[in-house]
Each structure stands twice: as structure tokens, then as C-alpha cells.
């Protein structure tokens, strides 16, 4: 996949991973593991404390090295095969959607998932990393997005799409010249990352899965009945003038921050800005279709993997087991002050989350997430969807024909990738 596609994926925040790889370095005192980490500074401080405790208990030295999330992928791909890679890597580039690419290249090795692990973590921690019938990672946290709304304008969050669309029309305010001064609801119609919940709610999807949990590229759900309904609804909002054709995330955020937008589909990334501007915000799961499917936004999964280049695979597994303990997960999550949503059940059920109503709400929002397909073919969509939406928004094409064309281009590109 091209550089631009990768950058776009990173910007969309699909899925992060903590990749654990062993360089096999030996110190004077004994074995040494090196960890590349893209965790935040406060998390890395706690990570260092955990590493030192592990050293005292086992005699295995663990070094945590902070990394730039945008360069770690290239460094790992270049260094690991040459035996220069890290022992453990908390790695943005080794994101969940790269699982297939790494597995094909034999950069990572499958994990043994025990019954204890399954009982301790939510399914999302495992099904995000399945490739070829094997599980290559274990999730640490999930980041997704929900319905963000201004409590001054919205007294109670809508529970269904139908309710939300009715509210959006009522809350849209126009001046004497019919220009909109306050929007009821906005989403960038060209940004599939944020419009995907429409598709999932009506039964659309990117790729289906087989019985083993692998993504099936022969089963594309972007032109099925549900996807047609979803995009038709988006275009209905556009054609009514409720969503401008040229609106983007920057415009949407500015409007919300200035109190000129009631509801939007977005994540927590600018909550501090909104609050600083005096917006009393609410955050809830994205509404569902009445009597329909659950709404699934895309999710970003930060997790653990093991490098196949490890010279000390058993030590790598032991340190991974140590990191997966409930109390260790609790410490890491709390070190970032609740800004990550845990996939460890014990942490999610702890007082830290359950006694804070806002943090408790973020659990409900993020556990709806659908991990983006972790296969190389998944990246193709980000090349074709912007062009497809431009044609639909600026032309006179039918939704059904447009989606059939999109699916056809997807299949052609997949075929070309395999040749």
C-alpha cells in the first residue's frame, strides 16, 4: 500500500498495537529485554516502574524506550529481520489492521490464548487480531467514537437513528435569509471512518468473516441492501441541506466548539477544547436503527504482539503474561487518567470507572467498536471511497449504482494486489 494510504490510516486512527519483540540481548547481569513504547509520558513512567519491579522479581532487565509513533513501523520492519529490533515494542505502525501484513511477512507469531485470558478480557481483545485462523495479538485498550452532543441544545440523547434525524431537523436554526446558523447534526459525508456507523446500523459491512473469524475478501458488503439504505439516508440529509456537501471535520469541530452544532459523530480528542469554550457536552453510544442491527463504529485497538525474530521467545511470553495481569493493567490504565478504555474486564469493572459517570459512559461508547479489517486488502477502500463520494456528492448518480461501482473497483484492486 502507498505512503499516502498509510498516512491516511494513521490519521483516521484505525488500530494501534503494542508489539512485543525480542532482540535477544544479554547484559552482564543476565537477560535483557528492550521495549519500544509509543505510550504517553505518564504511561511510560508507570511502564518503567513496572519494568523495574519485573527485573527485581525475575532478574531479567527490561528497558523501556519511548518511540515516535509515525516512524516506529519503518524502523521495526527494517531492524527486526536484521536482529536489531526491540525486545518489546509499543508500536503505532504495528496496528491491528497490519496484523495480516505482518503475519504474511512472518514478522509476528501467533499467541497461545488460554481460558484464563479469555475470561479476563473482552472478545474485542482477541478477534481484532485473528488472521489465518490464528490470533496474533491481545488487546490492551480500545478507542472509538460516539454521539457527542451539546447538553444546552439536547436535553436527552436520542436512542435511535429515526429519533436523531427528527431531532436534527427540529434543532436546525435558520436566519431570515434561510441560512443555517445552528446545525442539528453533522458528519463529514466523505469520511467513511465516521459514516461507517450508518452502514453497520443498516447491515452494511466491508468484508464478511468465515467460521474461523478470518476476513473474507470475496464477501464484500458495501453494495448490499443495508449499505444502499445507509448511503441513501446520508444523501437525504445532504439533499435537504442539513449536511453541507463540503463540510469537513475542522468545520464540524469549530461549529460545535462555538455552540452552533447540537450533535455530531466524533471521538473524545477535543473534549478539553469544547469544555474550555464553555460547552457542556454529553457523550453516548451512537443511536441504533429502530428494531435493527446494533450500530458499530470503527475502533482503534492497542494491544500486544510477539515478534517472530525473538531470540528469547520464552522470556517474551513470560513478560507478556506479567503485563496481562489485572493489577498491572489497572496501573497502566490509571496512569493515563482514564483516557484509555480497557479491554481487561477487571479494570473496566473497577471503582476507577464505575464511580465516575463520564468514564463509565465511555465504556459503553467504545465497546460498540468494530475493528477495521486487519488484512492488506482493507487499505484499498481508503483509496477508492473519497473518489466515489465526490462523484456522488457532485454528480447525478444513483446511490445503488455508485456502490456497485465501488464494490467492483474494490474487487479489481484486490485481484491486482494478488497478482
Image (cartoon, rainbow, N blue to C red):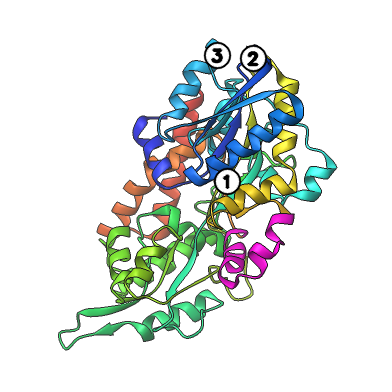
Q: Which-is-in-front pick, marks 1 and 2?
A: 2
Q: State which tag comes first along the sequence, 3 or 2.
A: 2
Determine which of the numbered discs, if any, sits on residue 362 in the image: none
Determine which of the numbered discs, if any, sits on residue 301 in the image: 1
Task: Judge by depth and name the residue closer to the eye, 212 or 259.
Answer: 259
Residue drawn where x is 39% and y is 64% of the image: 272
Task: Judge by depth and name the residue closer to the eye, 28 or 88.
Answer: 28
Q: Which secondary structure lies at badge 2?
A: loop
- Whole-angstrom CA distance, mark 1 to mark 2, is 27 Å
- Which region shows up in magenta? 346-367
For label 3, count other residues whose C-alpha is less than 10 Å away and answer few (under 14), some (14-19) or many (20+).
some
Task: Judge by depth and name the residue closer to the eye, 91 or 155.
Answer: 91
Residue 119, percent from left and from top = 81, 50
Q: Is residue 232 magenta?
A: no
The residue under label 3 is: 81
Q: Which secondary structure lies at badge 1?
A: strand
Q: Is residue 391 above or below residue 169?
A: above
Q: Which secondary structure lies at badge 3?
A: helix
Residue 384, percent from left and from top = 38, 43
Residue 48, percent from left and from top = 58, 36
Tell me: 285 left or right of 110.
left
For label 1, count other residues whose C-alpha is less than 10 Å away and answer few (under 14), some (14-19) or many (20+).
many
Q: Quadrant of the N terminus?
A: top left
The residue under label 2 is: 24
- Whole-angstrom CA distance, mark 3 to mark 2, is 13 Å
Residue drawn where x is 73% and y is 55% of the image: 345
Amino acid at each position: 500500500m502507498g505512503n499516502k494510504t498509510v498516512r491516511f490510516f494513521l490519521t483516521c486512527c484505525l488500530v494501534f498495537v503494542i508489539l512485543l519483540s525480542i532482540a535477544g540481548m544479554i547484559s552482564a547481569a543476565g537477560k535483557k529485554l528492550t521495549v519500544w513504547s509509543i505510550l504517553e509520558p505518564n504511561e511510560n513512567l508507570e511502564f518503567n516502574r513496572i519494568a523495574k519491579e519485573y527485573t527485581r522479581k525475575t532478574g531479567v532487565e527490561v528497558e523501556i524506550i519511548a518511540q515516535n509513533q509515525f516512524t516506529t513501523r519503518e524502523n521495526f520492519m527494517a531492524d527486526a529481520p536484521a536482529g536489531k529490533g526491540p525486545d518489546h515494542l509499543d508500536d503505532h505502525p504495528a496496528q491491528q489492521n497490519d496484523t495480516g501484513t505482518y503475519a504474511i511477512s512472518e514478522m509476528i507469531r501467533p499467541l497461545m490464548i488460554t481460558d484464563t485470558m479469555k475470561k479476563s478480557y473482552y472478545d474485542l481483545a482477541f478477534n481484532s487480531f485473528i488472521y489465518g485462523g490464528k490470533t496474533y495479538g491481545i488487546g490492551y485498550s480500545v478507542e472509538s467514537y460516539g454521539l457527542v452532543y451539546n447538553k444546552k441544545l439536547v436535553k436527552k440523547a436520542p436512542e435511535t437513528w429515526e429519533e436523531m434525524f427528527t431531532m436534527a431537523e427540529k434543532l436546525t436554526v435558520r436566519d431570515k435569509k434561510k441560512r443555517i446558523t445552528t446545525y442539528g447534526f453533522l458528519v463529514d459525508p466523505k469520511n467513511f471512518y465516521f459514516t461507517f456507523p450508518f452502514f453497520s446500523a443498516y447491515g452494511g459491512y466491508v468484508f464478511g468473516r468465515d467460521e474461523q473469524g478470518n476476513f473474507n475478501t470475496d464477501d464484500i458488503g458495501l453494495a448490499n441492501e443495508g449499505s444502499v439504505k445507509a448511503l441513501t439516508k446520508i444523501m437525504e440529509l445532504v439533499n435537504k441541506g442539513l449536511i453541507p456537501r463540503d463540510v469537513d471535520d475542522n468545520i464540524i469541530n469549530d461549529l460545535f466548539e462555538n455552540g452552533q452544532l447540537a450533535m455530531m459523530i466524533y471521538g473524545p480528542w477535543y473534549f478539553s477544547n469544547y469544555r474550555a469554550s464553555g460547552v457542556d457536552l454529553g457523550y453516548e453510544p451512537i443511536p441504533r436503527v429502530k428494531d435493527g442491527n446494533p450500530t458499530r463504529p470503527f475502533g482503534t485497538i492497542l494491544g500486544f504482539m510477539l515478534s517472530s525474530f525473538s531470540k528469547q521467545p520464552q522470556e517474551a511470553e513470560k513478560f507478556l503474561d506479567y503485563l496481562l495481569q489485572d493489577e498491572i493493567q489497572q496501573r497502566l490504565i490509571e496512569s493515563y487518567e482514564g483516557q484509555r478504555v480497557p479491554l481487561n474486564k477487571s479494570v473496566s469493572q473497577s471503582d476507577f470507572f464505575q464511580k465516575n459517570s463520564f468514564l463509565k459512559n465511555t465504556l459503553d461508547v467504545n465497546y460498540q467498536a468494530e475493528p477495521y479489517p486487519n488484512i492488506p486488502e482493507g487499505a484499498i477502500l481508503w483509496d477508492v471511497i473519497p473518489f466515489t463520494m465526490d462523484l456522488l456528492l457532485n454528480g447525478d448518480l444513483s446511490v445503488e449504482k455508485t456502490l456497485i461501482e465501488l464494490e467492483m473497483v474494490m474487487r479489481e484492486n484486490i485481484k491486482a494486489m494478488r497478482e
